[in-house]
Image (spheres, rainbow, N blue to C red):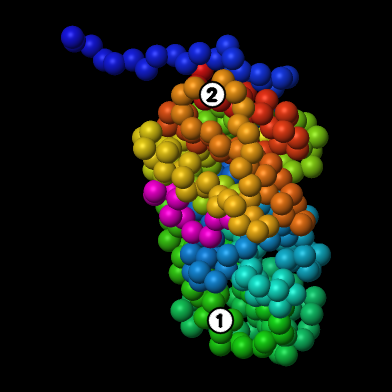
């Protein structure tokens, strides 16, 4: 017969979704300047290097270290110690910052932080890099300049006898800030310079790929350009107030909120085209087989001592794959479900089994309906 095959609509009548929405939520465009700047920061986040891209030893994302979106000095937290940031960077449009550490004892780990700050033009970025580096010296007169051989225009400094190195690098309209900090106290200046340059070698080409939203279009910036955030369970307002609004990504930017990932291989393996971070995590693949690969990639090991255990899955999910688990971690025990429906993969967490099952059923309805 002529024509195109059509996937039959799944039967959703057997789902218990509780009070969770089962219809897509449309986010529209940014409602004000702050929301537009925040959304632009999320877009930029997909082009900010992850420290493990320069050195695979950095495997642990550090929480509570600022950002990830940078709108003012507060979002940089302890990474910037001088108090002139908001004055020097008054023309800041947006930015993105994150910190990753090596494995092992947190008290002796090495940490690498990177922030990318975006300004209206290259001249402003150059002036900001100069100003912030200058104020690092006036804040602490024991700082000494350091030359990055591969990046002679970068401004870097350290305090002899300390195991940290900071740098500011202007690149087109961006300022890239890096900070290496070795909590073990090993003061290897040559090693710190090498790690900083390795991260810059990854970062600067990424910025050449980013296309900022034109200033005249910032008021029309879409919050969900790929339509995937609409298919994730929405954050409640308390979570938005505490952790920031939901986000839409296409790659590395999403890793600030995803645990257990120390490479970007899953993007290729799963043929990922879009990622939504809200009350649930939703990834869209270009193919069904890609979504199935994600389901297998994120499925945890079960059965070992102190490991993750399988638990019952919600009823009524008839098209795709679902599996639920309980993780008995000392600091953060959790229950969660993995779901694959068509070209979509989702991760859903819940505090109690009934709540988890209702959330997962609602997530399935959003994806399958």
**Residue at image mark 2:** 317
Q: Is residue 47 above or below residue 54?
A: above
- Rendered location of residue 364, percent (x, y): 56, 25
- Which portion, as a residue range, is magenta? 260-269
- Rendered location of residue 283, percent (x, y): 50, 38
- Residue most extreme to the top: 1
Between disc 2 and disc 1, whose residue precedes?
A: 1
Q: What is the tally of numbered marks visible in this picture?
A: 2
Report the residue at 26% width, 15% height from top: 4
Q: Which quadrant holds residue 39?
A: top right
**Residue at image mark 1:** 193
Q: Nearer the viewer, residue 122 or 43?
A: 43
Q: Is residue 263 above or below residue 266?
A: below
Q: Is residue 152 left or right of residue 238?
A: left
Q: Is residue 76 left or right of residue 114?
A: right
**Magenta span has 146?**
no
Report the residue at 56% width, 37% height from top: 323
- Rendered location of residue 156, percent (x, y): 61, 78
Q: Give the CA separation, mark 2 to mark 1.
A: 53 Å
């Amino acid at each position: 017969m002529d024509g195109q095959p059509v996937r039959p609509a799944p039967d959703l009548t057997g789902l218990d979704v509780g009070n969770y929405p089962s219809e897509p939520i449309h986010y529209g465009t940014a409602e004000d300047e702050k929301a537009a700047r925040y959304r632009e920061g999320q877009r930029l986040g997909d082009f900010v290097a992850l420290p493990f891209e320069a050195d695979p030893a950095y495997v642990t994302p550090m929480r509570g270290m600022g950002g990830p979106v940078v709108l003012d000095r507060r979002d940089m937290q302890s990474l910037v110690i001088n108090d002139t940031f908001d004055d020097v960077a008054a023309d800041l449009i947006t930015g993105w910052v994150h910190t990753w550490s090596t494995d092992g004892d947190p008290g002796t780990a090495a940490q690498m932080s990177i922030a990318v700050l975006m300004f209206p033009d290259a001249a402003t970025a150059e002036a900001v890099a100069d100003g912030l580096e200058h104020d690092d010296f006036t804040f602490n007169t024991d700082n000494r300049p350091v030359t990055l051989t591969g990046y002679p225009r970068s401004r870097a400094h350290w305090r002899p006898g300390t195991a940290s190195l900071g740098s500011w690098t202007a690149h087109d309209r961006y300022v890239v800030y890096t900070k290496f900090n070795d909590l073990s106290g090993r003061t290897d200046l040559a090693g710190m310079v090498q790690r900083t340059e390795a991260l810059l070698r990854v970062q600067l080409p990424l910025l050449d790929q980013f296309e900022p939203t034109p200033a005249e279009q910032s008021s029309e910036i879409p919050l969900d350009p790929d339509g995937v955030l609409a298919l994730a369970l929405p954050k409640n307002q308390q979570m938005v107030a505490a952790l920031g609004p939901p986000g839409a990504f296409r790659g590395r930017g999403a890793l600030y909120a995803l645990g257990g990932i120390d490479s970007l291989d899953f993007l290729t393996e799963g043929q990922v085209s879009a990622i939504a971070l809200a009350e649930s995590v939703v990834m869209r693949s270009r193919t069904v087989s890609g979504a199935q690969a994600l389901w297998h990639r994120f499925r945890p090991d079960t059965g070992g001592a102190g490991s993750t255990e399988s638990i019952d899955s919600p009823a009524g999910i008839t098209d795709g794959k679902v599996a639920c688990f309980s993780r008995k971690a000392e600091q953060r025990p959790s229950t969660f479900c993995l779901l694959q429906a068509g070209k979509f993969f989702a991760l859903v967490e819940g505090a109690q089994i009934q709540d988890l099952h209702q959330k997962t059923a609602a997530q399935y309805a959003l994806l399958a309906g």
